[in-house]
Image (spheres, rainbow, N blue to C red):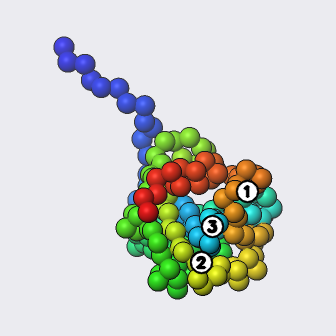
Amino acid sequence: KVMKPVFKNRPNTAHKVGDKEIWESRSPAVVGFIFSIVGQDMLVLAEKRSNKMPDEPGKWVVPCGYLDWDENGWDALRREVYEETSFFIDKYSKYVAYDHNKDPFYVMTEPRENRQNIALNYCIIYDFTDKGLPLAVEKYTDDEVAQVKWVNIKDIRKYDWAFEHDKRIDMALNKIEL
């Protein structure tokens, strides 16, 4: 007798909406680690979540969000970073020192949280030593974002981070091949 393999999945659920079948499934998200070199300092673009946010309000994160229809991971990253911080990645392309060929440096698929997101983690490093840090982003806020800040890597442990973003900052810095 041949043994069938045992899997621990739960099948996705389909819902009928009009004449269409919509599948309930795990959601892909993008996470953007935007680093800046200024002289001897390394900083990361971070935001404090507003108290209106349902998950982890008041905690710090790097820009992140979900992929939309007809959008690839890199385009979702560009959009989310801009929507949440006003930093437009393309505007500073000549200062890019590293972007992992616009591919994620880490893909997280482990179903650990309530939403079981699949996270595509991207890393971009800019060298703003000669230009100076684009500080206008620190004035940005909206309903989801209470504060935007360039956080010095030396000070990461002083902040209360959501979604293990502090650990992912460390991971990104350890994987960088400049």
* Labelled disc at residue 40: 3
Q: Quadrant of residue 16?
A: bottom left
Tell me the residue that label 2 is attached to: 129
Q: Mark 1 and mark 3 in contact (Cβ < 8 Å)?
A: no
Query: Which residue lies at the image location 73% right of the left edge and 50% below the top edge?
Result: 157
- Give how far across and how far down residue 71 sits, in percent: 42, 72
Question: As displayed, is residue 159 above or below residue 52?
Answer: above
Which label lies toward us, 3 or 1? Answer: 3
Q: Are marks 2 and 1 in contact (CB under 8 Å)?
A: no
Q: How far apart are marks 2 and 3 (CA)?
A: 9 Å
Of residue 70 and residue 109, the one placed in the foreground of this image is 109
Of badges 2 and 1, the one in the foreground is: 2
**Residue 72 visible (yes or no):** yes
Amino acid type of the residue tagged 3 in the rendering? Gln
Q: Quadrant of the C terminus?
A: bottom left
Sequence-wise, the earlier of marks 2 and 1 is 2
Please, what is the three-letter code of the amino acid marked with disc 1? Asp
Instruction: Mark 1: give few (<14), some (14-19) or many (20+) Cα within 10 Å.
Output: few
Rendering coords of residue 22 (x, y %): 44, 59
Left or right: 6, with 82 as reference point:
left
Task: State the residue at coordinates (53%, 55%).
Answer: 173
Check disc 3: other Cα within 10 Å, few if <14, some if 14-19, many if 20+. Answer: few
**Pointer 3 or 1: first along the chain:** 3
